[in-house]
């Protein structure tokens, strides 16, 4: 695997990717594997999740999404973001994250713990062990954020796709995290399906289907960076 990666990219790019992957593995370990994918839930209309990857509270909500097997439409709201952050203020009254809208029940809510409990109660699955540990839960999530050096926290310039992308990958998968961080920083809206296996991205705007974290990250940069 690694020798193919090195042949396809420069040595520097390969080392940079391996560094990011290693720190993402550490982030998953700090969360004790929370965010395992469940069997896909039958949700009807798709819930919408406003969040950003560099937020420890949002991580707790994303883990619950993955554990419940709920496909959600993610509208990334990195700091400095201009596409979806204003929507949250308009809809909920404040720029606080995560923010969930579920058209199936007309629920709109802030607070990661409330979102986690709601998803499990409504769609099944179980809250991860780490989320039952009180203050340790948040501290662990903060350390996981620091392990990734705040990746997915701040906006980078990008072109907005006309249609949302579709991404397959579980929250606890270190490879999927690298992709979601890039999607978040670029403020690219996507339908997230938390499933097992290697990360995969479908782009209805170009017809492209890309597998593998580094390939997807490269595709996003080449396609949507100005």
Image: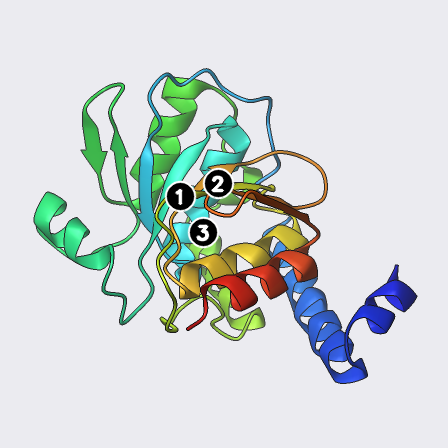
* Residue receiving disc 1: 164
Residue at 21% of width from left, 27% of height from top?
107
Q: Is residue 94 above or below residue 194?
A: below
Q: Which of the image's four quarters has the N terminus?
A: bottom right
Q: Is residue 209 above or below residue 30?
A: above
Q: Which of the image's four quarters has the C terminus?
A: bottom left
User: Which tag, 2 or 3, sits closer to the chain's start?
Assistant: 3
C-alpha separation, residue under disc 1 versus residue under disc 3: 21 Å
Could you tell me if the residues under marks 2 and 1 are in contact, i.e. CB atoms within 8 Å?
yes
Instruction: Say which of 135 and 79 sits in front.
Output: 79
- Mark 2, residues whose alpha carbon is within 10 Å: few (<14), some, or many (≥20)? some
User: Which tag, 2 or 1, sits closer to the chain's start?
Assistant: 1
Q: Is residue 108 above or below residue 90?
A: above
C-alpha separation, residue under disc 2 versus residue under disc 1: 8 Å
Q: Nearer the viewer, mark 1 or mark 3?
A: 1
* Residue receiving disc 2: 204
- Mark 3, residues whose alpha carbon is within 10 Å: few (<14), some, or many (≥20)? many
* Residue receiving disc 3: 59
Would you say residue 178 is visible in this rendering?
Answer: no
Would you say residue 186 is visible in this rendering?
Answer: yes
Furthest toward the front, the residue is 206
Q: Position of residue 43 (x, y in %)?
A: 40, 18
């Amino acid at each position: 695997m690694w020798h193919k990666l090195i042949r396809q990219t420069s040595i520097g790019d390969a080392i940079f990717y391996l560094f990011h992957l290693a720190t993402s593995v550490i982030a998953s370990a700090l969360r004790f594997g929370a965010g395992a994918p469940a069997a896909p839930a039958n949700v009807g209309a798709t819930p919408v999740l406003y969040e950003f990857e560099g937020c420890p509270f949002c991580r707790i909500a994303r883990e619950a999404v993955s554990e419940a097997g709920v496909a959600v439409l993610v509208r990334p709201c990195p700091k400095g973001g201009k596409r979806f952050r204003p929507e949250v203020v308009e809809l909920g009254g404040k720029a606080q994250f995560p923010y969930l809208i579920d058209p199936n029940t007309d629920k709109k809510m802030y607070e990661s713990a409330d979102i986690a409990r709601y998803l499990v109660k409504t769609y099944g699955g179980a809250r991860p062990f780490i989320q039952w540990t009180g203050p340790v839960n948040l501290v662990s999530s903060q350390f996981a954020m620091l392990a990734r050096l705040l990746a997915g926290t701040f906006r980078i310039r990008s072109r907005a796709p006309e249609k949302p992308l579709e991404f397959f990958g579980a929250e606890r998968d270190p490879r999927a995290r690298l992709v979601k961080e890039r999607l978040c920083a670029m403020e690219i809206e996507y339908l997230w399906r938390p499933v097992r296996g290697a990360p995969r991205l479908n782009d209805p705007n170009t017809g492209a289907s890309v597998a593998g974290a580094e390939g997807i990250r490269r595709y996003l940069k080449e396609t949507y960076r100005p």
